[in-house]
Amino acid sequence: MTSIDTDETGLGPGWVRACPTSDIDIDTAFIVDVKPPVAVYHIEDGFYATDDTCSHAESSLADGYIEEGWVECELHYAKFNIKTGAVMAPPANRPIGTYPVQIVDDIVYVDLSEHRGCAIAALRP
Amino acid sequence: MTVSSIAIVGASLTGTRAAEALRSQGYDGAIHLIGGESHEPYERPPLSKRVLLESTAHADLALRQEWDSLALDLITDEHVVELDTPGRRVVMQSGREVIADRVLLATGGAARDLQAPGERLTGVHSVRDLEDAHALRAELHAAENVVIIGNGFIGLEVAASARACGANVTVVSLTRIPMERSLGARWGTLIGRRHEREGVVMRTGVGIAELHGTSRVTAVALDDGTVLPADLVIVGVGMTPRTELAEQIGLTVAGGIVVDALGATSNPAIFAAGDVAVQPAWRGEGLVRYESFHNAEQQGAAVAAAMLGCPAPVREVPWFWSDQFDMNIQVTGEVQSEAEIILRGDPDSDAFSAFHVSDGRLVGAFAINQGRDVRGAMSLIAADVAVSTEALADPSVDLRRLARSSR
């Protein structure tokens, strides 16, 4: 368990090391083992991080299906926008939080102190 | 004609999804979303599961967090009693009326009656809406002997919830194979065995003679003479589609409101979708009523396009899920035929998937705790391409990526 109060990475308090960029293939995700867990995704536009737990039911989004910048939970096929956390398909009704990501020397870092709740309830109208 | 006012009769998933799709297609006219319940639309799948086990507020289940952006005229606690199609009037029980150029009937269904003596006794429940689920939850945690009538997905989900509450549970059904309509014989049988492993007593191929009790139910008498003690009874013997309005105006009704693939009825101004609709089977012959979350969502979106005269979205392969005990059960496509089945994993284990193949093509899939495989199967079935049995059996092959590469 990483403490987010200390500056262990030199990037500032809250930043934790996730993994080397080469560990995450395109359209897959890596789980950062913190509580609650965080998913780091490698999509076409780069690396992004969100809460790993689906907002609808207890399921890991990193185990879901990733395509075109969205992730789909494998339990009930709720869909979220990876960059914004917004709901794109039910049965989820709440967005997932997102986190800032930095790449330094081919290592992915995530700022756990910057949990950004998603203000957009849905991309749907 | 220009469509400037649409009435949606039934404020649940289908109706909400249709309203959302109307807006996302650019429709900016009036939408009257009329529902019989006092709540804003909510999701029903948890009613037989989470809502029975935990304290759940309506807000947890609401289909949306906010409604303002849809600019709906959301009318709750109202029942539509008349459609005056020449006058375009939609008339409600209170006497309130709205004028509509298009009407979507998304009225769903009501729990089917058991039609056995004693079914009105206290302690006899069905599960269709949030009030039903809350009433059942209030009794479930203190119940010792629970009898569930019906072995479809509602019956089995409630059975799993009742076991989680520590009750003795018996499932009684006329049909021999659990969930056979959704899962086919092989997988229905397997799910039934899982329930027995969890301590549920399955009594199949037997009907109900009567329910005993003076004010509250005390026992269930079966037609083979068995009497099962019961302090709580849940009836899950299917639903009756609410077709009264459709019948009033002479639409074609046959076990549901008959629609085409786009949700159009025999009247050009009236559409129907969701649990109440009977539509052409996804592939193959005949008309089908799909009672699934997925169908409600998909058909709600498709019918919105049809009402506006826009091109319809591609119809997805039918898909269905049920959560029971620690099993996330998923099924897609056609799994009734057992001619050729390819397994990924051991069917006696906690997680496996099975692929139904016909003429070298994938036609259906079933899985327990392996939803990814079912999702991949949906794409492969839709693509209708030849699939090698080796790829299907190999857990390292991601089926959705395979489908993507075969496009």
Image (spheres, rainbow, N blue to C red):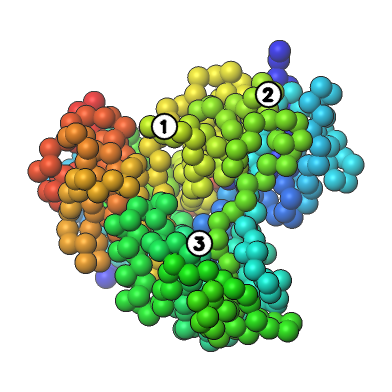
The residues bearing labels 2 and 1 have C-alpha atoms spaced at a distance of 23 Å
Image quadrant for the N terminus of chain B?
top right
**Residue B244 position in % (x across, y down):** 73, 42
Q: How crowded is mark 3: few (under 14 residues within 10 Å), some or many (20 or more)?
A: many
Between discs 2 and 3, the one toward the N terminus: 3
Q: How far apart are marks 3 and 1 (CA)?
A: 27 Å
Q: Regarding mark 3 in the picture, which secondary structure is present there? A: helix
Do the numbered discs 2 and 1 sit on residues whose CB atoms are within 8 Å? Answer: no
Comparing marks 3 and 1, which lies closer to the viewer?
Answer: 1
Residue drawn 64% across and 40% down?
A: B106
Question: In the rendered image, which residue does mark 2 sit on?
Answer: B267
Give neighbour class at mark 2: few <14, some 14-19, many 20+ (Cα, 10 Å): some
At label 3, the amino acid type is Ile
Residue type at mark 1?
A: Glu
Q: Which residue is drawn at 19% across and 45% down?
A: B340
Say which element carries label 2: loop
Letter of the chain that mark 2 sits on in the rendering: B
Type of amino acid under label 2: Asn
Task: Provide residue A16's location: percent of width, then percent of height.
Answer: 27, 59
* Residue indicated by mark 3: B154
Marks 3 & 1 on one chain: yes
Q: Residue furthest right?
A: B95
Measured from the top left, where is residue A57 in percent x and y?
43, 60
Indicate which disc, 3 or 1, sits on the residue closer to the N terminus: 3
> In percent of the image, x 29 and y 57: which residue is there?
B186
Q: Distance between the residues labelled 2 and 3?
A: 33 Å
Can residue B14 be seen in the rendering of this structure?
no
Tag 1 residue: B285
Residue A68: give x, y in percent of width and height: 32, 34
* Callouts 2 and 1 in the same chain: yes
